[in-house]
Image: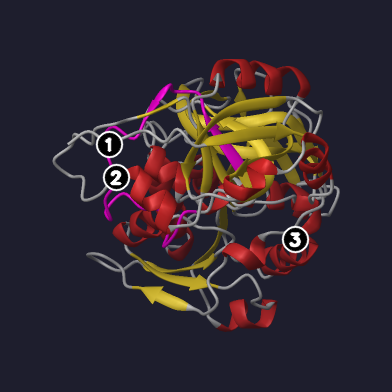
Amino acid sequence: MPRVISTEPAVLVLEDGKRYAGRAYGARGRTLGEAVFATGMTGYQETLSDPSYAGQIVLQTAPHIGNTGTNDDDLESAKIWVAGYVVRDPSRIVSNFRATRSLDDDLVSGGIVGISGVDTRAITRHLRSLGAMRAGIFSGADFELSDSEQLAIVRDAEDMKGRNLSKEVSTPERYTIDAVGERIGSVAVLDLGVKSSTLRYLAQRGFDVIVLPESVTTDEVVALKPSALFYSNGPGDPEASERHVQLLRDVLAEKIPYFGICFGNQLLGRALGFGTYKLPFGHRGINQPVLDKTTGKVEITSQNHGFAVDAPREGVVDSPAGFGRVEVSHLSLNDNVVEGIRCLDIDAFSVQYHPEAAAGPHDSMYLFDRFRDMVLAIDKGEPQTEIHSIIDGKNQ
């Protein structure tokens, strides 16, 4: 039976004073966060449950949202993490054999305040022009606040720059996922907002996956004697995660191999001595083109980040932190942002995007195989030239 779309009023307020009137969607009340847009045409459930979206009010550029409903299989974590949700047309009908409930049900039960019936194209163009900014959604009793009161609340909200969100999204306790099939070793995963698919794909490559809270110490990591260390995706400003940067430096000094994605790419960049900076509106979606500089291949990737590594795009440079030679391995074809780093004198590499492809294309799934092959080569005592041929993809 078709659902009745709410006619209760709601408003999206941006910190520059722009206001967009619409209808209440999901829970009622007020929510604050950084307004960003995501360009994926599918995968709204994976987007909502991605911990990297913590603290952000997500606007979907796809106009029709909710038509396939929701289920437990497509969740990337135990809850919805977005601070708020903005859509143009919520579906009145759920039509998919895998659906067990509606998106509306999940938003209400998760306490996610949203808004529908707004011109998402106009909002996206505004954010592209001026950049991501603080915002608030107001409905229910909070809709009755005056325009000036609502704007003051938004402008008093915490800015994403300088914000450390790792404690909010990380596991509180260590846990292990056993290797699937033949075991090749163990990987210590620092959970900075890891997605379920990432852990599953690591286990499928033969790793015992030891998931660690963000509060773990260097001594605790080294005592595990892992075959490798993995830093996950996650929200927040990498400049506010210096403890995780130092942890990575300590582990790299112990000659433990490393692979990082998204936030893990930014933290490797900082560990190597490079800076990071905030992008105007970030990369969020499942259609981001990336060039692998070594192979010349172009991958369509899934991304969700608002910060990037500031490193030389061309040539080999020395790590300012003393970890040997480094080069940028991948670049965004949209704006030339650094999308990957490869170390030439230590066993470490990272990418800025999400190879687990939940949701998104599968172009980058090979990176999990590359990581496995690197660990196997190290365990066999292969020469450094062979190991780095694996890291840079020359043997693929």
Q: Residue 3 shows which numbered tag?
A: 1
Front residue of 238/153: it is 153
Front residue of 90/82: it is 90
Of callouts 2 and 3, which one flags the residue occurring earlier in the amino acid sequence? 2
Q: Position of residue 49 (x, y in %)?
A: 45, 51
Callout 2 touching callout 1 (CB < 8 Å): yes
Q: Quadrant of residue 248?
A: bottom right
The residue carrying pointer 1 sits among few (fewer than 14), some (14 to 19) or many (20 or more) residues within 10 Å by Cα, namely few
Look at the image and tell me in which quarter the N terminus lies.
top left
The residue carrying pointer 3 sits among few (fewer than 14), some (14 to 19) or many (20 or more) residues within 10 Å by Cα, namely many
- Magenta residues, as a range? 57-80
User: Secondary structure beneath disc 1?
Assistant: loop
Task: Give me the residue at 37% from left, 44% from top.
Answer: 104
Q: Is residue 69 magenta?
A: yes
Name the residue that disc number 2 marks: 102
Separation of disc 2 and disc 3 at Cα?
A: 40 Å
Which secondary structure class fits the magenta region best? loop
Q: Is residue 109 left or right of residue 101?
A: right
* Kind of residue at disc 2: Ser
Q: Count every numbered label the image shows and give the total.
A: 3
Front of the two marks 1 and 3: 1
User: Secondary structure beneath disc 2?
Assistant: loop
Q: Position of residue 193 (x, y in %)?
A: 55, 58
